[in-house]
Each structure stands twice: as structure tokens, then as C-alpha cells.
Amino acid sequence: MLEIKGLKVKLEEEDKQILKGVDLTVEAGKVHAIMGPNGSGKSTLSYVLSGRDGYEVTGGSASLEGEDLLELEAEERAALGLFLAFQYPVEIPGVGNMTFLRTAVNAQRKARGQEEMSAAEFLKVVRAKAKTLKIDADMLKRPVNVGFSGGEKKRNEILQMAMLEPKMCILDETDSGLDVDAMKLVSEGVNALRDAGRGFLVITHYQRLLDHIKPDVVHIMADGRIVKTGGPELALEVEQNGYADILAEVA
Amino acid sequence: MALDDRKTSATETRLAAMVMPDVGCTKDAREAALARVRAMGLPQRRDEYWKFTRPDTLIQPEAPEAALFDAGEEPMFSDVERLKIVFVDGVFSPEKSDDLALEGVQIDRLEDVCCKDDHWAEDLYGALEADGHDPVHRPLAALNTAYAGDGVTIRVTGKPSKPISLIYTHEDVTSDVFLHHVVRVESGAEATILENGPAAARFNKCMEIDIADGGTLHHIRAQGRDHERRAVTHLFARLGTESVFKSFTLTVNGVLTRNEAVVTLTGDDAVAHVAGAALGDGDFHHDDTVFVTHDALNCESRQVFKKVLRNGATGVFQGKILVKPGAQKTDGYQISQSLLLDDDSQFLAKPELEIYADDVACSHGSTSGAIDEDALFYLRARGVPRDIATDLLTLAFLAEAVEEIESEELRDEIIGRLEGWLERRRG
């Protein structure tokens, strides 16, 4: 599904190398988690994959189902089936949540040569999906993320994911700013989307999200590289001992 | 105070080219207005409120030529059920206009005012304009009162079933037009006035609006799309107790536009909202000069002005909230913002607050910026192409001004025009 080989990335504006050769393959149907200390490059990886400006790829490659992601515009990557759940979802005053969702869904359909969803059909689908995420009509009407609590913003991300039905989902610290109940709700939303055709890359600091979204593979990232890969037990090890032991071990 | 020679000479040069229409009963008002023009002098670049907008093409004797522009779309408000009053190059056209009879409103052509004894508008013509020069002179409005060639008087006595729609078409590439309308909304009455069309090569329009206690007036205007047209307009509104005045202006194109609004809240609990959305591409200079005076208790005023500028377009905002002594519990709000779609465009803003009461809430803000890159990426990461995302964010930027229009039908009409303008500039 997602194949990253020797990916090297620096900031465009300053001479600072963030990713120093990342190798990672996420297979369809699998959930991979990336853990790592602050500043290890986890969020940068998610931004580079989704096409944010400000980064310069200095080496390596990244592809989704064989298509070179790095050559594409952000919107083309999205239409290809890549989705990033933002760590900090952006507030957009003046754009209604529903308008935003519908524009996104139909833009992707159009890019894929599919017919646009009618207003009525869209409304039906969005209402059903919103309900399972406890998103009420008011939240759908309000401007995108404006005045939403931390939990509401993250639920709104998962609603977008559910509506867009991407092939490859990257969740960037989706647990940050969530209380226990909200984390459960968001995790249920993610788990409902798990299926054999979809890959997940879950970026997190903490093991607790992985109690709810059970990963198949756990990677530890440090200083711009994946330094260790293992099963779910690796996350537990981090939880108990912190990153110091692992980092010392691979140093 | 004596005027300097340059000003006097520019004023006299302009006046020499003017002919005062012979309309009996407004004669005194016109003579008085002419005296005001001479006392104030026509605007010059050095005048405090003309620093950002060059007045020379507005005061030179001949109107600069303005090519006719075929927008290739239906004129504004075409699908709206309304009473049409059409002016062609500033001359009322009975053939193109509807029958002026409508329940709840009395509409007369300006020249007919004098044919009727004790016409209600006789004392109002030029009166609000005459009161509107303190402390800022508006000589082009006085010039209008003196020389207006046509116009209508609208007296709202009930709740007319449809909007009164003033339509200004333009056929002559050098037309120089002065129109003057007088509006009186009686106690408890409510109406909507629409205005649209380019009007002339050079258009000077003045509208005096007197709203009695408990009266409500909605004013929605779309200024013509002719690229080379010039316009200077004045709205003078006086609001009585518990009255409401809501004005919205859409300006798309036009080489030079100066819209002045002078609003005075004279009765308690009155509400005045003045809003504008301007879209400029290239040779476009748009100036909103707004002066709201609170002179009563517990009144609310809002000024909401948004401008989208590209390709060297210029936007100007000069807005003031003046709270007079004793105008307690005033709630004043003023926002002026520009969205600069490139590095060549500019926005010049002069927000002013002057407050002489101690129990008021007044806020104001002015910003100038580009498209929010974070929001743009967020939309693109969801699959929305860059150009559509940019348009969506541009409409969002304008939303606060457009939402000042209460009628959903008219609001949608305006939004449709905004979308069309953006769409034509895509890619």
C-alpha cells in the first residue's frame, strides 16, 4: 500500500535535515504505529507524505499503490486515497462544515472520474456517519472546526475520514488533547474503518491510544530514522521504560 | 476660511461646465447647495479625506470616457420580483420602468415634486446632505444637490410587497450623470430598496434617507461592472427611535469608486448596519468612507467592509464612529479587512473612533492579509484543488459582510455574483 524508501527531507527555508532516510512499508489491511520522542520527525513524515509546502525532499521515494506520491499535488494525493488526520485541525471561519465535506467528497469523486454525490444522498450518508461519532446537526452546520473543543475537532477529522473512505490513513497524534471517553469514541470510529483494503499509520507518543487501536506493527522513530520495528509489545516496552533504553540499544 | 487659489479655480472650472436644472421648488435648496460647494471647494488631493483617492477625474469638467461592458450575464436581481425604476444614462425611462404605483409606498419622479402642492420631499431635498458636512466636508454631495438632473422620491408608508429596484443603465460612453433620491420611511413602515447598474461614464449619486421612529429600510446595491466607469456616491441616513437601517454594497470592477455613507442615529434604540464587499482586479480603486454618529441612547451600529484585491487593485477604507456626549450604552462595531491575492495590490485603511460618552462598547479592527496557507493546505489535503480551495476561502472572507443582508434570496443573488467573478478568474 504505502511504500517509503530512504526518504530524506529538509526544511525548505533553513538548512535543517529532518528525515534522514526513512524506510517503511504499510501493507493493506494493516495498522502500523510510529512512536518516538519529540522532534524525531514523526509529524514531518506525515506532512511530507500529504504534500504540505515548506519541505524539500533530498532523497528517497514514497509511493501509494505504486504511484509516486512526491510528484503529486496535495489534492491529487488525497484523490489517490491518502488521508491525513491532523494533529491540529485547522479552523476555517466562514466555511460551513457540511459545505466543506461535500466539496471535498465531490472534488475527489470528480478527480477519480466518478459521478458527484447528490445533495440528498450526501446528507443521508453524512448524517448516519455523524451519528456514530456523536456529531450533532449543529456541529455540521457550524464553520469548520470554529469553536470546536479538542475532542470535537478530532471527531470531525474521523468523520471526514469516514466520508472520504481513503485507502491509506495517517493519524497524526490523534490522541492529543483527548480525554478517555473522547479517545474511545475516536478509536471506535477508526476501528470501524479497518478493513482488508485499507492501511493505517498511527503516529503517537503514548501507548494508551494503541490499547484502543491495536497495531500490527510498531516502529520507533528517532532523529529522522526508524530505529526499531517490532510487534505491539514494543509499544508496551516504551510505556514502561521510555525511549532511553531503546535509543541506547540502537545507538 | 478662504480657500486657496488652486481649489477655487478648480471649483470654478467645474462649475462653469454645469447647468442647474430649472426645477422650481427645489431651486432654493439647489442655490443653497451651490453656495456650500463654493464655500467648501471641490476636493483636492491634499484634503484630509482625499489622501488615498485622487479626486481629479471626479471633478474635471468632462467625464473621462468609459467603454460599455457586456458582462455576458443577466443584470443583477433579474429574477427578483420587484418594482423596476429605470434610468438610462441618468434619465428616467417611463417605457422601461414599471408602473410606479405600489401599495404602501408613494414614488414620484423628482421633477414632479414641484408639480404637487406641499410635497413631503420638498423640505427634505438637500436637508440631510446640508447637515452632513460637519466635521467632514462632502462637496461632491452638495454639487449633486445643486445639479441633480433626475431622481425619485420614495415615501414608504406601509410594507410594500416587493423591493423597489433602481436600475441604472449606461449607453453613452461619455455620460456624466447626477442623480438624487430622497427616501422617507414613515413610522412602523418597512421597505427594501435595490440599486444596480453602471449608470454612466461618471456617476454622482446622492441618496437622502430619513427613517421615522420604528421604520425599517433595507438597502442592497450592486455597482455596475463596467471596468472604466467612475462613481462617487453618498448615502445620508437619519434614524429615529427604534428604527433600523441596513445597507449592503457589492462593488465588482469600476476604475474608480468612492462610496460615502453618513449615518446619524438620532433616536434611542436605533440600529444601523453598513456593509460592503468589493472585488477588484487590475485597474480598480475602491474607497469606502463611512461616518456613523451616535447621538442617542442604546443604539447599535456596525460597519463591515471586506475587499478582495488582485493585480494592482487598491482598496481604501476611512471609517469613523463618533459617539456624542450623552449617547450612553452605544454598541459600535467596525471592521475593515482586505484579502490581497498577490503582492501588487494594496489596502489603505483609516479607522477612527471618537467617543464622548463613558458607558459605551465600541470595537474596531482592520487587517490586511493573504490567503491563510494552513487553511489552504487543510482543504487541499482533503482533495479540494488549489483554485477551488482559494475561492472557497475568498468567499469565506467575504461572508461576514454578505451575511449583513437579511433576505436569503438577495443574499444568494449576491453570492452568485461573487462566485461568478471568482470562477472567471480561475486557473
Image (tube, grey):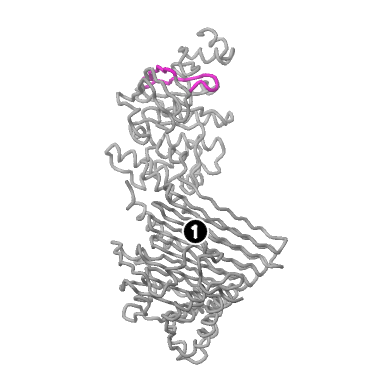
Q: Residues within 10 Å of mark 1 (few under 14, many from 20)?
A: many
Does any portion of residue A19 appear in the rendered image? yes
Residue for point 31% across, 73% down:
B172
Residue A29 covered by magenta stretch: yes
State the residue at coordinates (35%, 62%): B227
Residue A213 in the image: x percent, y percent? 48, 23
Q: Is residue A131 left or right of residue B227?
A: right
Q: Is residue B104 visible?
A: no
Q: Is residue B226 above or below residue A186?
A: below
**Secondary element type, mark 1:** strand
Q: Quadrant of residue B112?
A: bottom left
Q: According to the image, label 1 marks what residue?
A: B316
Q: Tag 1: residue type? A: Val
Percent position (x, y) of residue B88? 34, 76
Residue A22 against residue B99 in the figure, above or below: above
Give the residues in magenta: A20-41
